[in-house]
Amino acid sequence: MTAATATRVQTFIGDPFAEQTAVPREELEEIFADIQADFRYDHELNGCLNCGICTATCPAAHYYDFSPREIVQLLWTENLDGIYDAMQEKIWACAQCYTCAARCPFGNSPGGLIMLMREAAIKHGMESAKNVLRPFSRVMLKLISTGNQLAPDMITPDHFADWGPNISKVEAPLKVLRQAIPMPTLNTTKTAWEVNLKTSVELYTIWEATGVLDQLETIDENLFDVITDIMDEKREDWEDFLEDEDDEDDDD
């Protein structure tokens, strides 16, 4: 290897002997510590025979540059640089089917470990997480504002191009079919079903308590602001409803 080639390679993968690395060591250690601190970590990682059964049976491995075995090896050997690199793209190829967990002779769950890595990527505001989750912002807004993840009026060819020409069979008669359903809660096309105000407020409380909103603020601050405004309005409506109920009780 020539000196010029060595320099080019070091620029790409980082020089392990250099004083400064592409990502500060403290940041790499913090990311790994967050992954390892999760109570699921010890349950999902029990060692590795390096047999490759997980990768051989992985659907995603057949179509992407992705190997569940690589993920397990990176975590088992505590390869901090490798873990960080995998979090930039590879962990997002997993379909979370957990075929790997069913086949591993050691009882590992690469899919479960990848979920921990994804959560850490979101917590640390990695660009990979922002890029992957950005298309779901419309779904998130729909969930917060209506209590439904997906409504019939969202099923259009523009949003489901991967369905191919068969989407027309679903989209064309959709509104007619849904309006013919006898149950009133299913007649609507703008929401899958009506969610009452109390349920919405309870959902907001759960999202706050579980850190979902904190993660959203890290990933998409603008969407967080919009959703926060919606939540505040609905909470005010709920408080007004409770006050009206109390007034009626007093009158009785």
Image (tube, rainbow, N blue to C red):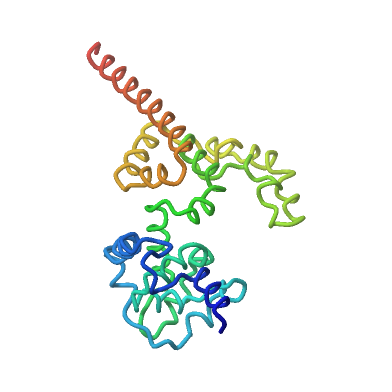
Q: Position of residue 245 (x, y in %)?
A: 30, 20
* The C terminus sits in image quarter: top left
Indicate whether 123 appears above or below 207.
below
Q: Residue furthest top?
A: 251
- Seen in the image, is 77 located left or right of residue 192? left
- Seen in the image, is 115 located left or right of residue 94? left
The residue shown at (68%, 45%) is 156
Q: Residue furthest left?
A: 250
The residue shown at (41%, 53%) is 122
Q: Residue furthest front?
A: 3
In the rendered picture of this protein, how many numbered marks are placed on residues? 0
- Seen in the image, is 204 located left or right of residue 86? left
Residue 102's quadrant in the figure?
A: bottom left
Indicate whether 107 appears above or below 190.
below
Q: In the depicted view, which residue is nearer to us: 146 or 110?
A: 110
Q: Position of residue 197 (x, y in %)?
A: 40, 31
Q: In the depicted view, which residue is nearer to us: 150 or 5?
A: 5
Residue 114's quadrant in the figure?
A: bottom left
The residue shown at (48%, 85%) is 52
- Seen in the image, is 188 located left or right of residue 118? right
Indicate whether 60 appears above or below 28.
below
Q: Position of residue 84 (x, y in %)?
A: 42, 65
* The N terminus sits in image quarter: bottom right
Q: Position of residue 212 (x, y in %)?
A: 37, 46
Indicate whether 2 appears above or below 59.
below
Q: In the depicted view, which residue is nearer to us: 2 or 248?
A: 2
